[in-house]
Amino acid sequence: MSLPATVSVREVGPRDGFQNEPEVIPTAQKVELIDALARTGVKRLEVTSFVRPDVIGQLADAAEVLERIDVPGDVAVGVLVPNKRGLDAALEHRTKIDEINVFLSASETHNQKNVNRSIKESLAGLVVVLGRAREEGLRCEAVISTAFGCPYEGRVSPKSVLHLAQSLHFAGAQEIGFGDTTGMANPRQVREFFTAMRQHLKSPANGVQLTAHFHNTRGQGLANVLAALEAGVDSFESSFGELGGCPVPPGATGNIATEDLVSMLEEMGIETGIDLDALLACARRIQEILGRKLGSHTLVAGPVEWG
Ligand code: ZN
């Protein structure tokens, strides 16, 4: 078993986290946190999303956040774009953006409840969005939600996930993220899943990057990370403070905490390039802003001290 020597971590807290917490965080504090996160050594940051402000009030200040943040040039700024209208809005700030994310669900019911479209309709829309974004020189990632299981439909066929991934890659996505949106995945499943995905998608000829996006809904997030590492995955998405959640099931936690992920990887001798103390300062700050305890373990225990 050989594990990767370095791992890429994409911080999604300012989008996935802020969007799914009940509070609306003031713009000035979002900007402060994004600027601080951009100085922890993390090289990719998802900062906001161009969604309808009447649907997701938490991110209604997307344009203002983008214009006000001060991110070093070697840190890629990403935004989530749900559709063509979102892309148009994002492109008004083209000079502030390096990459976009698009998404759809692997299960019909989840996609319908999430974006009110069939998977086929979503895919047709994303083909246009990805084509246009690539023309604009933006790096493109497509995330497939409920890739490991759906809270409404149960098991999701890896074959159908593979077909979606191939279609999205063909449409211009340079990276495919696989989301365990409601924390249904287990390590055995994850190891088999990524072994198969790598076989079909990661040949040197197409070179698509495969990324794992785990939620800690049932406390299995880091176990799933280890299984993905063992299957050769070297790119992960996570959220500082374990911010975020998901409407299904109600009250569930969100993404794995970036500081827990970084602590585990660095203790295993796998480099992330992220300064854990600087990252913990960001997690402490958002905990202070929200005024309640967050789910991150390393935030409570601190880094491992070997004396
Ligand atoms: Zn997530």
Image (cartoon, grey):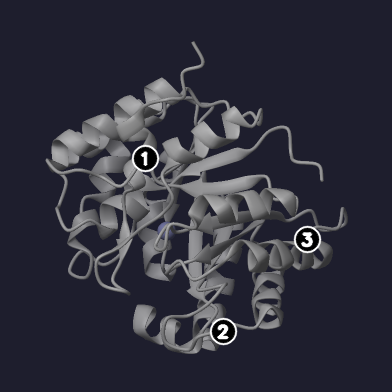
Label 3, label 1: how far apart the Cα atoms are: 31 Å
Q: Amino acid at mark 2?
A: Arg
State which image quarter holds ligand 1: bottom left
The residue mark sitting in front, 3 or 1, is: 1
The residue lying at 64 percent from left, 70 percent from top is 168
Closer to the chain start, of discs 3 and 2, is: 2
Q: Nearer the viewer, residue 110 or 193?
A: 193
Q: Nearer the viewer, mark 2 or mark 1?
A: 1
Q: Residues within 10 Å of mark 2 (few under 14, many from 20)?
A: some
Give the vertical position of 203 relative to 120 (above or below): above
Front-most of residues 88 and 76 = 76
Q: Residue 117 at what x, y percent from top left?
A: 42, 86
Q: Which residue is mark 1?
A: 297
Residue 145 x/y as whole percent: 50, 70
Q: Residue at x 27, y 48 (%)?
A: 63
In this view, 196 is above or below 125: above
Q: Give the residue type at disc 1.
A: His
The answer to whether the residues at label 3 and label 1 have Cβ atoms under 8 Å apart is no
Res. 155 mark: 2
Q: Quadrant of residue 71?
A: top left
**Residue furthest out toward the front:** 307
From this view, report whether residue 46 is shown above or below residue 117: above
Kind of element beneath mark 3: helix
Q: Secondary structure at mark 1?
A: helix
Given residues 296 and 43, the one toward you in this image is 296
**In the image shown, does 148 or 52 lie closer to the viewer?**
148
